Amino acid sequence: MNRELEEYYDSLREMFNSSGWHHLIKDLDENLLNINSLTNVKDAEDMWFRKGQINILSFMLNLEESIKLTQDSVESEDSNAENL
């Protein structure tokens, strides 16, 4: 893995370990529960808007795991390349 990519992953890991990140994830989880209900949807436009909100929230809530899987994959590829 090149140095720039390594620094990128290090900075993300630092962010994921911060108390601010944990507070943000907790808030996003709570928001998702409210947005994910069809009870208060007024019309089709509101439904599509909520769908967009849910997509963004899902991206943020899954970011840490997604980055971890990507980093593991890059490290595995680097290890395989070294073994050739």
Image: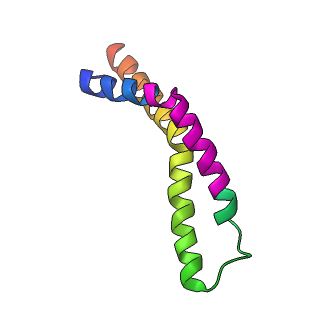
Q: Where is residue 76 shown, x and y percent of the image?
A: 43, 23
Q: Work out whether residue 50 or residue 77 is closer to the camera in this orientation and state it.
A: 50
Q: Work out whether residue 47 or residue 77 is closer to the camera in this orientation and state it.
A: 47
Q: Residue at the top extreme?
A: 83
Q: Is residue 30 left or right of residue 23?
A: right
Q: Which residues are magenta?
A: 14-31
Q: Quadrant of residue 65?
A: top right
Q: Is residue 4 above or below residue 25?
A: above
- Please, what is the dominant secondary structure of the magenta stretch? helix
Asked if residue 36 lies in the magenta stretch, the reply is: no
Name the residue at 51% across, 67% down.
52
Q: Is residue 5 above or below residue 36?
A: above
Q: Is residue 83 left or right of residue 3?
A: right
Q: Work out whether residue 15 or residue 72 is closer to the camera in this orientation and state it.
A: 15
Name the residue at 52% across, 36% down.
21
Location of the N terminus (image quadrant):
top left
Location of the C terminus (image quadrant):
top left
Q: Is residue 15 left or right of residue 1?
A: right
Q: Where is residue 70 shown, x and y percent of the image?
A: 44, 34
Q: Is residue 56 left or right of residue 10?
A: right
Q: Where is residue 31 shown, x and y percent of the image?
A: 63, 56
